[in-house]
Image (spheres, rainbow, N blue to C red):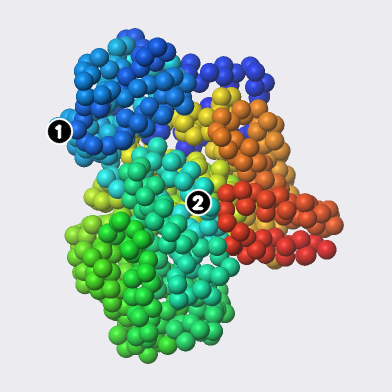
Amino acid sequence: MGLHVGRSGAFLSLSRLDLPRADAFDCRVSQLSFPVLLPMPRSIHIEQGAHSLRRRRITIYDDSGLGTDIAARIQQDVRREVHAEATIAGPSDKPHTAEILLRHDPELRPQAYALHITPRQAVLSSADAAGLWHAAMTFRQLLRQYRDAIPSCRIEDAPDFLTRGVMLDISRDKVPSMETLFRFVDELAEWKINRLELYTEHTFAYRNHREVWANASPMTAEDVRELDHFCAERFIELVPNQNCFGHLHRWLALERYKPLAEAPDGFMTPWGERRSGSFSLNPLDPRNMDLVEELLAELLPNFRSRKVNVGCDETFDLGQGRSREACEREGKGRVYLDFLLKIHRAVSAHGHTMHFWGDIILNHPELIPALPRDVVPLVWGYEANHPFAEQCAKFANAGFSFFVCPGTSTWNSVVGRTDNALENLNSAARHGLAHGASGYLITAWGDNGHWQPYAVDLLPLAAGAARAWALEANREADLAAQLDVQVFKSEARMLGALAYDLGLVYRELGYPIENASALFRLLFQRDIGNLRAAISDGKLQSARRRLQSVPSVLAGARCGRDDAGLITNEFALAGRLLDLGIARGLGEDAAQRAKCWAEFIPAFREQWLARNRPGGLEDSVAVMLKRMRDER
């Protein structure tokens, strides 16, 4: 059909695809001969026959003794996916008579499960409640794909990483609505993710710091407790996250907090950019530990988790301001570590385990042995060639439990960088496993306005979840098919390939940029002279042709999600936004570009508010408004 994507190296051109009409497709995804699951299990064997749920009476029997409500979840899934009714057996019924049986198997590893489907019975087995949940999620996906005739099969499955997490940025600039967060958690839970963090700088409603979050539509304590409960029901641990050192510019820009800043007069970044605002706390000021302790004391009780991510990454301005003399005398690494140790003591006082980004301490590897033995460093990096092997080895050799943290590659890109994301996700899993990482945390950042929509993040998040669960079973899996069947529910099987291919359009420009795409830079930078000099009109036109196919593909995609209209609109608007950047790069008529911006920005606002709170929206569109004014 031309839409099949099998390997991460595939590079399609939607503008050149011979797309059949939607009604030419076999629209029953149930006709696929082999299970398409997300994640793919590590072992699946097809047997003779099929298990039909088109019966007058379907019975679910929970013989696991694990005390869960998973039988009720399966009952709901049968109703939703098969449109059949099932009853949960009572104590007087017998296990062998049930069509669906939940069973305890103490021989299985933690979170592992077995799923054996015969023409007579579907048996879900595990040693623990989490494993039984994972079995139920796989069974749900089989119901979705095959509906009333699941092929007889035996699945044996277990995770590579016991902790498989996602960190969602809610500080630059999107704070999702509770409805969106619930949807997000449901998606993650089905993909066997079991940890969620909401990256926070200024978007929690601390009682004594209203001016910090007044315009941010923050998460409240009540929001967090409600989300925590929702996550726990789906075997996801909601872990508190509050940056406690760097990335506090929104705090330090306010008069009340300026005295706490390390470099109130500005600083130089490692890449030579002069920034005028404050960024990090002054580690020598005792008032800053008072602030950190206050924030932790208010934040942590809202979570049942006994872990907390305190950030402490990218303290670029350290030693450029009030701690300059101490850094010159003792060394910048030592000053950093001393403040980290103070944060650790505050975290320990609450009985929590401290997780922190490991980038700064990796610059001072001689200090790694001085870290407390119970901290968990987070090894992060977002390019395909990130040195995970070297960095993981430093913490592994020192005896620390640590996580690997790849990224979605969707920020600073609008539609993602598919090839970079997949290799980054693969590399983190491969080297994390080789060096004994205890967890895998996928990061979804929102730098520079968080312009990428919800729909764009689904591909790399799903791919990362699959690799965190079972790398070898998923590395060469047909990702487009996984997305179509289990995420987009696209009967025409178009959206998976579309999402994949959109994330490759940036390559048409032949201008690689670390942590961004040139297409995004054409939109975001005020002065694009360097880009126009380096990128030919022909390359820009080639990218445009790739984008011109998007509306026709979306029209025939037949997305089966309940938010299908939002999904297709998000892809369409993302394509329109990139085309505005291409128009800038080509130097097309300025008045026409201004008109296009004037039409686009209200649509962007509407899209934003469909899933997110209003706080942060004006910050996000500020650059768009500047570009529109530039054109006039």
Residue 309 in the image: above or below residue 253: above
User: Nearest the camera: 445 or 528?
Assistant: 445
In the visual, does 349 lie left or right of 462? left
Q: Which quadrant holds residue 245?
A: bottom left
Verify CB contact (< 8 Å) between mark 2 and mark 1. no
Mark positioned earlier in the residue sequence (2 or 1) = 1
Name the residue at 34% across, 58% down. Answer: 303
Label 2 crowd (10 A; few <14 / some 14-19 / many >=20): some
Residue 300 in the image: above or below residue 410: below
Q: Which quadrant holds residue 398?
A: bottom left
Spatial distance from mark 2 to mark 1, Cα to Cα? 37 Å
Q: Is residue 146 visible?
A: no
Please name the amino acid that badge 2 sits on.
Answer: Met
**Numbered mark located on residue 117 in the image:** none
Kindly state the secondary structure of the residue where label 2 is placed. Answer: helix
Q: Write down the residue under mark 2.
A: 178
User: Nearest the camera: 88 or 558?
Assistant: 88
Name the residue at 72% across, 55% down. Answer: 601
Quarter of the picture holding the C terminus:
bottom right
Image position, residue 302 (x, y; %): 36, 61
**Numbered mark located on residue 106 in the image:** 1
User: Nearest the camera: 417 or 211?
Assistant: 211
Kindly state the secondary structure of the residue where label 1 is placed. Answer: loop
Tell us which disc is closer to us: 2 or 1. 2
Q: Which quadrant holds residue 561?
A: top right
Label 1 crowd (10 A; few <14 / some 14-19 / many >=20): few
